[in-house]
Amino acid sequence: MKAWVVLCGDKKRELVIIEASRHSSRTRFNELDGKVYLGADVKPSNGIEANSRMSILACLAHELAHAERFELGFQRSISLPDCLIDESETSLHASFHPVLGPKDREDLIEDARDRLNQWFVEK
């Protein structure tokens, strides 16, 4: 996928695409194998939330940010509500990727805000 190559640049990172056509599959970073999995949810939907309207490039930038943060030693919480903080920080991290345009940056920043707001509600 061209978007992944553009995001990764010279760094070789694996994007697993075998699940992309599977109904309800999720785009995600897997810490166990260090790979990003492309899911059916990578394409924007009609939702009003920032997360649902993010472009494919913004979504992949978010997952790449998970990989980068993992390599830097960030410990991700996998349980609610604290996983929302990690998701928020990851969207902020992704928003700084140099290949992203203003709309993708805005969607990622709004996604970070939405996830923090959800954390406050659930906490």
Image (cartoon, rainbow, N blue to C red):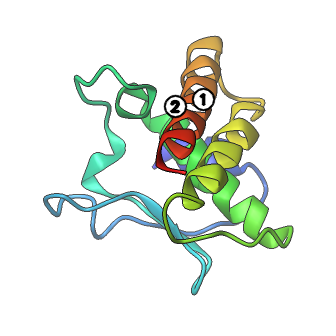
Quarter of the rendering containing residue 31: bottom right
Q: 9 and 67: which one is in front?
A: 67
109 horizontally vs 114: left or right: right
Q: Is residue 12 above or below residue 111?
A: below
- Toward the left, the furthest residue is 23
24 horizontally vs 9: left or right: left
Q: Specify few, some or many for label 2: CA neighbours under 10 Å numbering under 14, 14-19, or 20 or more.
A: some
Q: Is residue 80 above or below residue 56?
A: below
Q: Specify few, some or many for label 1: CA neighbours under 10 Å numbering under 14, 14-19, or 20 or more.
A: some
Q: Determine the secondary structure under disc 2.
A: helix
Disc 2 residue type (three-letter): Asp
At x 57%, y 60%, the residue is 83
Q: Which residue is mark 1?
A: 113
35 horizontally vs 25: left or right: right
Q: 16 and 75: which one is in front?
A: 75
Quarter of the rendering containing residue 58: top right
Q: Which residue is mark 2?
A: 114
At x 64%, y 26%, the residue is 109
Q: Is residue 104 above or below residue 12?
A: above
| Position of residue 118 measured from the top left corner of the image (x, y, whole percent) | 49, 40
- Toward the right, the furthest residue is 72
| Position of residue 5 measured from the top left corner of the image (x, y, whole percent) | 60, 49
Q: How many marks?
A: 2
At x 75%, y 42%, the residue is 93
Q: Is residue 116 above or below residue 29?
A: above
Q: Determine the secondary structure under disc 1.
A: helix
Disc 1 residue type (three-letter): Arg
- Toward the top, the furthest residue is 102
